[in-house]
Image (tube, grey):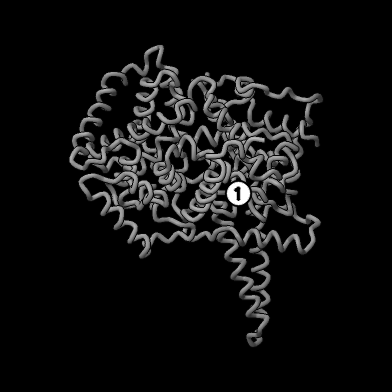
Amino acid sequence: MSTDGNKKQFWKRNAAKVPGSIQHVYGAQHPPFDPLLHANLIKAGNKPPPATPGKPKKATTFQEFESITSDAWDVGDDDDELLAMAAQNLNIEVVMETANKVIENHSKQQERQRQDDTTELEPREEDTQEEAAEDEEEDEEEEEDRVVEGDVTSPEVSFASQSSPYTDGRLVKSHSEAPIGSPKDAAGERAALHRQRSLPHRQPVIPLVARMADQNTSGTPAMTEREASRLDKFKQLLAGPNTDLEELRKLSWSGIPRQVRPITWKLLSGYLPANAERRDSVLQRKRQEYFGFIQQYYDSRNDEHHQDTYRQIHIDIPRTNPLIPLFQQASVQEIFERILFIWAIRHPASGYVQGINDLVTPFFVVYVFEYIEEEVENFDVSSLQEEALRNIEADSFWCMSKLLDGIQDNYTFAQPGIQRKVKALEELVSRIDESVHRHMQQYEVEYLQFAFRWMNNLLMRELPLRCTIRLWDTYQAEPEGFSHFHLYVCAAFLVRWRKEILEERDFQGLMILLQNLPTMHWGNEEVSVLLAEAYRLKFAFADAPNHYKR
């Protein structure tokens, strides 16, 4: 199929406006990738609908791009129905396939049991091998049972952008979904098995949020001697009467220990003064000022000129990190609504834009850690004292505001900051990896189609939240980290997937990959490598702009 046909199908399925959808509020309108919406698209054997003849009109301006795309979250009731249908189809197929597999294995076990009952021979080597095979099949049954019961979070059934010999480079949910009887050689099967075994082990499971400062991909939170030494350095630096912010930035660049992250973020963002004696009075004043805004403005959320803004916020909040129970608590969602509404009222040049809701979550989690020792992913915030919750809310508001002050042109009308950064990303990638850049051009993938979200949400929808918080340690420490250094992180992030990108041979495959990059099991190690590469790029190009201009 031609590239034009693939592009038509992709945008028809993923960017068409749903009838009855609500209006955008200065909308950040690039559609986030939803694996459920793509489930039928990438199933082996499903033929896409024939493309209508004729070449689609290319968006020549940012406004035209906005007019032909819409945020997949910014829809009305029709969207919930569509997601439910997709989920139902997905579950039925997975359950049916798994059930058939379980029945088949069970029949084989019964047959072997009958054979064992009719023979009384001494144990032989073959019997030992048979028992090992049975154990392996029992493990498979247990895994399949977990799938039937709805454990879709395991890496074996999650969508991963790794090519499979059964899908011609398309995505599959598991190795077992390959069509039975597919004509593949032994080498291909061995390669598939190797890829499957190379996935991270199921245990221990890395929490999406909990102990983010301590987590790595092995899932072991124990503090090493080096980490203990770094924590001591932070504590000594923070204990002085006047904190040396430059020294604190140097120390924070490589990551901040969880125990001192709240106060370090507040200092690096400029929310707290370096002078220790002034901190308590500043905190008290700023917190009172925030709740003064609540009393002054929050009751106006249902006024005619504010109701569209509040309605959009109210719709977006439940969809913020939906897999993390912490953010589905009613009290947490009310806190987020107040923070976002007050920020929108105080910044009329941009107002509320979809994507800003994501930017509250790292601050909120970090400041919750200031009051608890246990894991936060399932923590019930109602168990905190009211004063603690009020402090967390006010601190999150002010630090988010400090962040957005540096990137507000990302969210003003037509979002010019994002346009400039996406263009700079394209120029940078063309210099550091011409093969990837030409591959994008060959299949007519425009950087705006995937990198818009990277800039709008600061890679928060591409990385687990624990990785985002580690990334923001460095952004807080780096001069213009959110506004400037982020560009080099995006370039390093894109080139990180060059092998997978070059393996995709059509527009549709590239877009699915770029909107669903397999980072769920990333930890501190992967983020540190990404940041080191980004710093290398910044060192090479930031002070020599002609280097990335042809």
Residue at horizontal 36%, vertical 60%?
227
Q: Nearer the viewer, residue 501 or 241?
A: 241
Does 445 appear above or below 505?
Answer: above
Does 57 appear above or below 495?
Answer: above
Q: If the image is split into quadrants, where does the N terminus sit?
A: top right
Does 442 appear above or below 350?
Answer: below
Residue 355, position as x, y percentages in the image:
48, 31
Residue type (three-letter) at the residue carrying disc 1: Arg
Task: Give the crowd class for mark 1: few <14, some 14-19, many >=20 residues within 10 Å.
Answer: some
Residue 311 relative to residue 142: left or right: left
Residue 481, position as x, y percentages in the image:
45, 39
> In this view of the protein, can residue 165 be seen by the observer?
yes
Residue 520, position as x, y percentages in the image:
53, 49
Q: Nearer the viewer, residue 478 or 3?
A: 478
Residue 263, position as x, y percentages in the image:
29, 44
Label 1's element?
helix
Residue 185 relative to residue 153: left or right: right
Circle count? 1
Q: In which quarter of the image is residue 477?
A: top left
Residue at horizontal 40%, vertical 16%?
306
Please identify the residue farthest to the top as the structure is shown.
Answer: 304
Q: If the image is split into quadrants, where does the C terminus sit?
A: top right
Please identify the residue farthest to the bottom as the structure is shown.
Answer: 122
> Dot 1 corresponds to which residue?
496
> In this view of the protein, can residue 151 be seen by the observer?
no
Residue at horizontal 71%, vertical 47%?
502
Q: In which quarter of the image is residue 338?
A: top left
